Amino acid sequence: MRRSLVAGNWKMHGSLQGVSALVAGLKGLDGAVGVDVVVIPTLVHLPGVAEALAATSLMVGAQTCAPVAGEKALTGEVSSTQLAEFGCRYVLVGHSERRALLGEDDAVVAKKFAAIQEGGMIPVLCVGETREEREAERTLDVVGGQLKAVIDAVGVAAFAKAVVAYEPVWAIGTGLTATPEQAQEIHAAIRALVREADAGVAEGLQLLYGGSVKAANAAELFGMPDIDGGLVGGASLNAEEFSAICRAAGRG
Ligand code: 13P
């Protein structure tokens, strides 16, 4: 049985004071049954959050990292190796905001995916279609293409230590959530695509849904057979709401 996982992507939100209040509000999730919980603050907040949560079961992740591990002359970047030293366990890669606004293409995404694993952390590969692509019935092409680009670059075996998040772009921050059936359809297709390359890896792969997840829709989404948890944006900035979402994912 795959474990449930819920990750809160704080994006470029939070002040020192706000982040410390949010972290304090999350302590009640320590030891939550049947679900792994990860919070993903900005890079500047990450060390403080990691320290504050060090004695709890909550884990910390990063929203991005450099496309190469180790140290080198690469102004403005932070490597996976450096993140790992701060107790970072997961790193998002391929988020649609970075693909659309910062020009990250499949080649960069694949390099970052490999660099994250080289640093000993788990990449959370984000894939998803825009509204136009869905309306043109290209969802499976787009999502499958984003996934295949990384499988082709790093090999399917690398997905034994990775997570995939399906985040339809039209559902992010819009209040429009994919229905559990719509999300399940794409999750099943993603797993089938991985299964074609390696059945064992496909079976163990955690698939998260992201896009306007909230306490009110979480249980229904997480109840679908191929939805193993969530990647939560806006609702993860509210400790009470995020805690309720995590509890909805607990299966233990
Ligand atoms: P929202 O939950 O705010 O829609 O954001 C989803 C997301 O982009 C998480 O990575």
Image (spheres, rainbow, N blue to C red):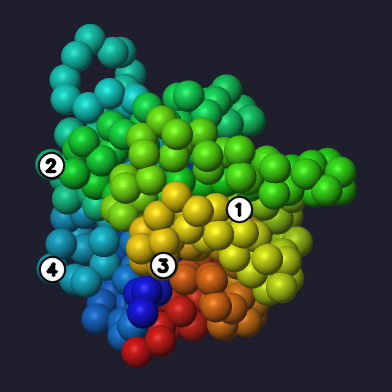
The reply to whether residue 95 is visible in this rendering is no
Q: Which residue position is annotated with label 3? A: 203
For this view, does 107 lie left or right of residue 252?
A: right
User: Callout 3: few (<14), some (14-19), or many (20+) C-alpha neighbours within 10 Å?
Assistant: some
Residue sticking out furthest to the right: 135
Q: Nearer the viewer, mark 3 or mark 4?
A: 3
Q: Nearer the viewer, mark 1 or mark 4?
A: 1
Q: Is mark 1 within 8 Å of ligand 1?
A: yes
Q: Earlier in the sequence, mark 2 or mark 3?
A: 2
For this view, does 17 lie left or right of residue 49?
A: right
Q: Earlier in the sequence, mark 3 or mark 4?
A: 4
Q: Earlier in the sequence, mark 1 or mark 3?
A: 1
Q: Classify 249 as above or below 107.
A: below
Cα distance in 3D space between marks 3 and 4: 31 Å
Q: Are marks 2 and 3 in contact (CB under 8 Å)?
A: no
Tag 1 secondary structure: loop
